[in-house]
Every structure is written in C-alpha cells, then in structure tokens.
Image (cartoon, rainbow, N blue to C red):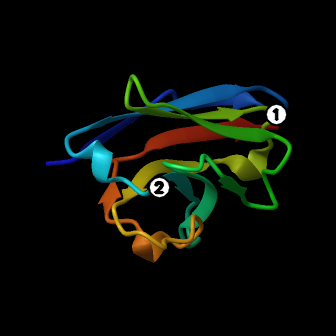
Amino acid sequence: QVQLVESGGGSVQSGGSLRLSCAASGYTYRFSCMGWFRQAPWKEREGVAGIYSVSGSTYYAASVKGRFTISRDNAKNTLYLQMNSLKPEDTAMYYCAASDQYGTMLYDLDRYNYWGQGTQVTVSS
C-alpha cells in the first residue's frame, strides 16, 4: 500500500513563505514521478510542480515559476515544496501525488494514481 501524507500548510500574509512536505510510504520505489497539485474553491485541480524520480527533471506551472521550488529527499522518502513570495491567488488545498506509470507528463494529473489528503494554504493580502 502506498500512503502520502502532507504537512506544512497554514495561513500566511502576502509575501510570506511556507514549506510543504509529503511523506511517502509503501512501494515508493515504483514511483516514476511525484508532484504537487492545488485546488481552489470553485476551480479545477491544477498542477503546480512535479519532479521525475530518476532524472530529477522538474516542471513548474507558469504562475509559480521563480517562486516555488520542488525537491525530494530520497533517503527520507519525502517530497517538498518551498513556496516563497506567496500571493492571495496561491490560496488553495495543496495535494501531493505520485505516479507509477512511466511516460507520465508531470502536469497531467490524470496519470497520477496515488494522492494525499491535502493541506490547506491560505494567503491573506
């Protein structure tokens, strides 16, 4: 069984920073990639950032590029998302996800088959 558990969400003012963590357990060696997605009220879930397990190549949504950094600690089976210069429009539930399907495009949420429960990020102006 695979389990993904997010932590690190909270409330910050505009311009602040947060670091999200995602602790993975189970068959993590099968992951081809991991990613962060977010969903704001009344909006569709969208890809924020992703990272391939082998190459370490990353993807960032245009809206977060230059402000967010995704990283992974393989020894700890933990995925991170460092979020700087946060804006009110970053307010959303953030989800950690993993895919064991090779060929997955990092932004394609339909290819991710393991999901965490989410952690709320609220940015006030």
Query: Which of the marked residues, 2 or 1, is nearer the chain's N terminus?
Result: 1
Residue 69 position, x and y percent, is 71, 38
**Badge 2, how many Cα within 10 Å: few under 14, some, many 20+?**
many
Q: Do the numbered discs 2 and 1 sit on residues whose CB atoms are within 8 Å?
A: no
Residue 61 position, x and y percent, is 73, 60
Disc 1 residue type (three-letter) = Ser
Q: Is 6 drawn above or below residue 17 in the view shown?
A: below
Comparing 16 with 21, the one in front is: 21
Question: In the visual, does 50 lie left or right of 95?
Answer: right
In this figure, which residue is indicated by the disc labeled 2?
Answer: 33
Residue at 42% over, 57% down: 32
Q: Which mark is residue 14?
A: 1
Residue at 60% over, 35% down: 71
Residue at 84% over, 34% down: 85
Question: In the visual, does 115 lie left or right of 120?
Answer: left
| Residue that extends furthest to the left in the rendered view of this protein | 1
Question: In the visual, does 89 lie left or right of 24?
Answer: right
Residue 28 position, x and y percent, is 29, 44
C-alpha span from label 2 to label 1: 30 Å
